Amino acid sequence: MCPLSCIFRVTGLSMLPLLLPGDEVLVNPRAYRSRLPRPGEIVIACHPARPALRLIKRVAAVSGDRYCHLMGDNPAQSTDSRSFGAVSIDRILGRVTSIFK
């Protein structure tokens, strides 16, 4: 992961209508060094079963045991915590801070 910020390109439909395929997002990998993610924030995370696969999802809930429920804004096109369960905070790569259309 990058030290200060990274740019990721959106490839799927799971975050429609906010994010379209081809949009780019700026990610802060240091966002959660001193605090937990908050519901409503958009994050980049590693898929729990396929760590090389990067997901862009919205934090739906955070539990006290350092796990997050991640959801896509477009549920009909999203593989998210409804299918793979809660995601460890350790699998979150950073918080989306900017969107480039």
Image (tube, rainbow, N blue to C red):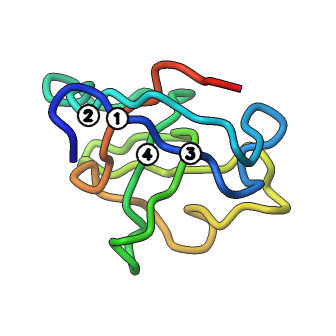
The amino acid type, in three-letter code, at marker 2 is Pro
Q: Which mark is residue 6?
A: 1
* Residue at figure coordinates x 20%, y 28% from the top left: 30
* Residue at figure coordinates x 57%, y 27% from the top left: 40
Q: Are marks 2 and 1 in contact (CB under 8 Å)?
A: yes
* Residue at figure coordinates x 54%, y 48% from the top left: 56
| Foreground tag (4 vs 1) | 1
Under tag 3, what secondary structure? strand
Q: Is residue 95 left or right of residue 16?
A: left
Under tag 4, what secondary structure? strand
In the image, residue 55 above or below residue 29: below
In the image, residue 74 above or below residue 95: below
Structural distance between the alpha carbons of marks 3 and 2: 16 Å
The amino acid type, in three-letter code, at marker 4 is Ile
| Foreground tag (4 vs 3) | 3
Under tag 2, what secondary structure? loop
Residue picked out by circle 4? 44
Q: Which mark is residue 9?
A: 3
Structural distance between the alpha carbons of marks 4 and 3: 11 Å
Q: Which mark is residue 29?
A: 2
In the image, residue 48 above or below residue 31: below
* Residue 69 vs residue 80, the one in the foreground: 80
* Residue at figure coordinates x 33%, y 72% from the top left: 51
Structural distance between the alpha carbons of marks 4 and 1: 10 Å
Q: Are marks 4 and 1 in contact (CB under 8 Å)?
A: yes
